[in-house]
Image (cartoon, helix red, strand yellow):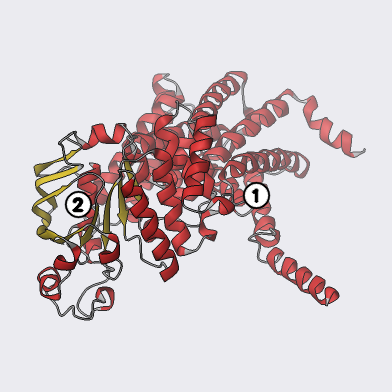
Amino acid sequence: MDLFDLLLEPLSYDFMVRAIVTTALAAVVCAVLSCWLVLIGWSLMGDAVSHAVLPGVVLAYIVGAPFALGALVFALIAVTLIGVVRNTSRVKEDAAIGIVFTSLFALGLVLISVTPSQTDLNHIIFGNLLGVSVPDLIQVLVLGVVTFAILVLKRRDLTLYAFDPTHAHAIGLSPKRLGALLLGLLALTSVVALQTVGVVLVVAMLIIPGATAYLLTDRFSRMLVIAPVISAVCSIAGIYFSYYLDTASGAMVVLTQGAAFAAVYLFSPRQGLIGTRLAMARRRKAAALAA
Amino acid sequence: MSNPAILVENVTVHYGEVLALDAASLTVEAARICGLVGMNGSGKSTLFKAIMGMVKPDAGRVLINGESPAKARKKGGIGYVPQSEDVDWQFPLSVRDVVMMGRYGHQGFTRRASRADRDAVDLALDRVELSEFASRQIGQLSGGQKKRAFVARGIAQGATMMLLDEPFAGVDKRSEATMTRLLKELAADGCTILISTHDLHALPQLCDEAVLLMRKVLMHGPPEVVLQPEHLAMAFGLDVLNRDLPEQPGVPERPDVANQPGRN
């Protein structure tokens, strides 16, 4: 069996095709968003919102509403609660985030445990990539495309917000509204990625691609291309690994992204731990030869 | 046009229990360069925020060219040069990218740059002598060049008023002279300039007027009068004869951190 067959064989199963499409889409949307999250320093916020949407998704399931609606409502509740706890007590922000999102996540788990047809809902926690149904795929597709479009159209405003919110204010934009937009898109993206890797691992897709791209370039516009490309490639590779190694698919996707980050961290010519030293050694050698 | 460029009238601002500005009043006419002097925690940043409309005064009012700060912001007339500590210098943006952000108020929904925007950015970069560094990442500029990049952003924006927060911190003598010349040119073109600083060396050459701030405006006049040691002593309450305020014992580095809402 040659490489071509290795790549094609899984595609003969419909469920694998759906898994790959869903993952690639979620990977791209998450990766684009992650560029702003890592630069603003909102990684913990990404962690919080992606966990805190769980009760919203479960409640939406119970009443038959769209998952995205429940997720948005609970993302809003989480952000509000974090703000209230931080501003009205002596508890610092990181602790406030920790308290709120774990409590909401636990609420979601409790709701799952009392809701009949538990099997379906448990998939939300760890993802169920291989069980993506056609309606699931359509929901992810619609949400993913809408989120992606807003992110791309508003990318310059979001970058301005990340870099200098005071200037945004000074030229008549509303930093508050831009922050709220980013949080709302974060909630939607969490729903997109739930299906793929599950609530617990969404945060990986929301941080690793942006951080990896950040080590590779000094241009934000390039980060916005590098991050989704790396993320999509790693995610699809992860699915193939999980197919042939017979391992958990969502976890394998995250593991592949983590490995890509490690490689860049070590070997990036700009920032890499080993890469920069190799480049320096090469320069020294060239200088010695020239002398 | 008899309205002053900046009118601050009896503005009082509290952060929780802390009184940051106490009925401060200040009038600056158009095309003047005004230096705002006071120690950390004297309300310099709060006054800036009130002028930009980032904090709502508990009492009093602010007018920019006779209009509310919100209207002035929408018109794009207010340029802001942040102090160095407030900027993430690792941010992956080029000097040109940063200056282009000055044009966002003039652009459409997606902030797509037009020919006119690119021309305005090139002109602004040229004016601050940074054209050759346009594609550098902003962190890879010297202290003075960094400040000038943000001034260029204000120029590209077409700001008629510029607020500069500590423009001389971490700037060498030569860059300081370049900056002084640049700001004087801008003022000659009609731009009103307000500078907050505790570096008093640069003020007499640069400013048309100086303001001593200690929660309220203690004094407002020509810099050579306002910066007399006996007057400075009112604002700093200390021996300031050596004119080297940041290193003074007893002046905490950043007492205003404790005043920020949401921190305890």
Which label number is shown at residue B216? none
Is residue B168 visible from the viewing direction of this image?
yes
Residue at left offset 44%, top offset 64%: B175
Neighbour class for label 2 at 10 Å: few (<14), some, many (≥20)? many
Is B65 positioned to the left or the right of B92 in the image?
A: left
Camera-near label (1 vs 2) is 2
SS category of the residue bearing label 1: helix
Neighbour class for label 1 at 10 Å: few (<14), some, many (≥20)? some
Q: Chain of mark 1?
A: A
Residue type at mark 1: give it: Leu
Is A159 in front, or is A256? A159
SS category of the residue bearing label 2: helix
* Relative to B54, residue A273 above or below: below
Is B33 positioned to the left or the right of B106 in the image?
A: left
Residue beneath label 2, please?
A: B47
Is A280 in front, or is A76? A280
Residue beneath label 1, please?
A: A255
Q: Quadrant of the C terminus of chain A?
A: bottom right
Mark 1–mark 2 Cα distance, whole angstroms, equals: 50 Å
Is B151 positioned to the left or the right of A31 in the image?
A: left
Residue A285 x %, y %: 81, 73
Residue type at mark 2: give it: Leu
